[in-house]
Image: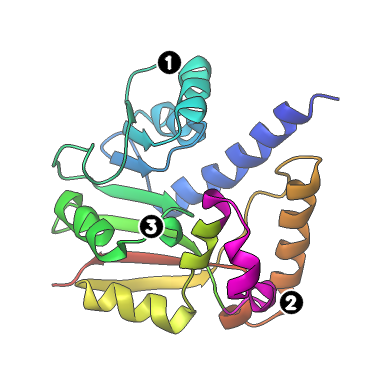
Amino acid sequence: MNFDRIVQLSYLAQYTSLLDKLRVNSKTHVLDVGSGFGFLKKLVTNKEGRYVGIESDSNTINSAITLYGCDGFIYGFFPDAVPIAEYDVIVALTVLDEVPDKAKFLEGIKARLHPKHGICYLAVRNRTFFINHFKTSNTMAARSARAKMYSQDLTSTEWESLLTTAGFEICDFGKFYRPWFTGFNFFGLINLSYKLISMIIPRRYSYMLFYLIRIKK
């Protein structure tokens, strides 16, 4: 069984639903921050929309280019590597929670979002999720630099305060779930277990949250 293909299909299924929610069509200009393997590119271009994806990991973006070609992909860090433009839709899934300077990141979003009709979909981890209670200063000190990024998580109340202070209006919010299958390995099983737990607990305690925002009028 080709597990890589199953992972790809699970992501494509979730992102198809997301693009329908965001009403992406042939007139939509989409910026994908933390574009990963570029699955959104395939779906946006299928709708004849315009796509730009930025990814900071060289191995990941090379895989995306192998899958979907180099057009539209930028290698680098947001916001500095993305030219100023007015995007109709900006998507950032599990990116903002790993950024130390969240205010700068949100200023970058605001500078690139169409001021009248632009919308941004953010998915972030929630510090109130039970597993974070085990992340003491001693355990985090022994972890890798990549793992320490997970200490940047905020609570739902803190996320909402951050977004409104940055000049955004929250149009919708809720629980965010990773695709149903992210790999037949330790991390894939962990993601599945976190999803199942989050489905039965209140939003403020769930593993991940989403926010649909626009620039405050």
Q: Which of the pair 158/89 is nearer the observer?
A: 158
Tell me which numbered mark, 3 or 1, is placed earlier along the sequence: 1
Q: Quadrant of the C terminus?
A: bottom left
Asked whether residue 134 is drawn in magenta, I would say yes
Asked if residue 136 lies left or right of residue 210, the reply is: right
Nearest-to-viewer mark from 2 and 3: 3
Percent from the top left, x then y, of residue 108? 21, 53
Percent from the top left, x then y, of residue 45? 39, 27
Q: Quadrant of residue 49?
A: top left
Query: Taken as a whole, is the magenta stretch helix, strand or loop?
Result: helix
Which residue is under mark 2? Answer: 200
Q: Quadrant of the N terminus?
A: top right
- Residue count near mark 3 (Cα–Cα under 10 Å), binned few <14, some 14–19, many ≥20: some
Q: Amino acid at mark 1?
A: Gly
Disc 3/disc 1 C-alpha distance (Å):
28 Å
Q: Amino acid at mark 3?
A: Val
Q: Quadrant of residue 84?
A: top left
Q: Which of the pair 164/15 is nearer the observer?
A: 164
Q: Which residues are magenta?
A: 128-147
Which residue is under mark 3? Answer: 99
Asked whether residue 201 is drawn in magenta, I would say no
Name of the residue lying farthest toward the right: 1
| Secondary structure under the numbered disc 1 in the rendered image | loop
Q: Is residue 61 above or below residue 35?
A: above
